[in-house]
Amino acid sequence: MRIALGADHAGVHLKQEIRQLLDERGIAYTDFGTNAIDSVDYPDFAVAVSKEVAGGRFDYGILFCGTGIGMAMAANKLPGVRAA
C-alpha cells in the first residue's frame, strides 16, 4: 500500500500525528507538504496529492486541513478522485 499525505497550515499538526502512526505500523507514505504553520494555499497540496493518486502512483491520499471541506472540494476537481 502506498499513501500520499498533504496538508495546509491548519492540518500540519494532525498530519504529523498520522505520520508517526504510519511509521509505527511500518506503512509506507510520501509527504507532499506543507510542514510549517505559515499560511499556504490549500489547493496546491490537495492537487499535488490528488494527481499522484489519480495517476496510480499512490493507492490512497490523505489530506489534512482545518475543516476538510476545501481540500475535498479541490481534490474532487480532478478526474478519478473521490474525496470526502
Image (cartoon, rainbow, N blue to C red):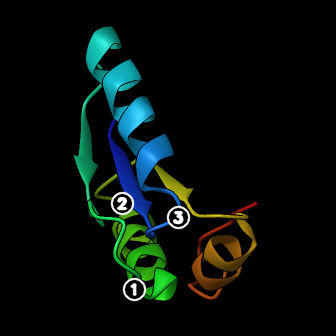
Q: Residue 56 carries which label?
A: 2
Question: Which quarter of the picture shows residue 83?
Answer: bottom right
Q: What element carries label 1?
A: helix
Q: Label 1 to label 2, Cα distance in Å?
A: 19 Å
Regarding residue 26, the answer to whether it shows in the image is no
Label 3: how many Cα within 10 Å (few below 14, some 14–19, many 20+) = some
Q: What element carries label 3?
A: loop
16 or 76: which is nearer to us? Answer: 16
**Identity of the residue drawn at 70% across and 64% down:** 68
53 or 66: which is nearer to us? Answer: 66
Image coordinates for residue 32, horizontal then vertical, percent: 27, 63
Q: Which mark is residue 44?
A: 1
Q: Say above or below: 24 vs 71.
A: above
**Identity of the residue drawn at 39% across and 76% down:** 45
Image coordinates for residue 39, horizontal then vertical, percent: 41, 82
Type of amino acid under label 2: Gly
* Nearer to us: label 3 or label 2: 3
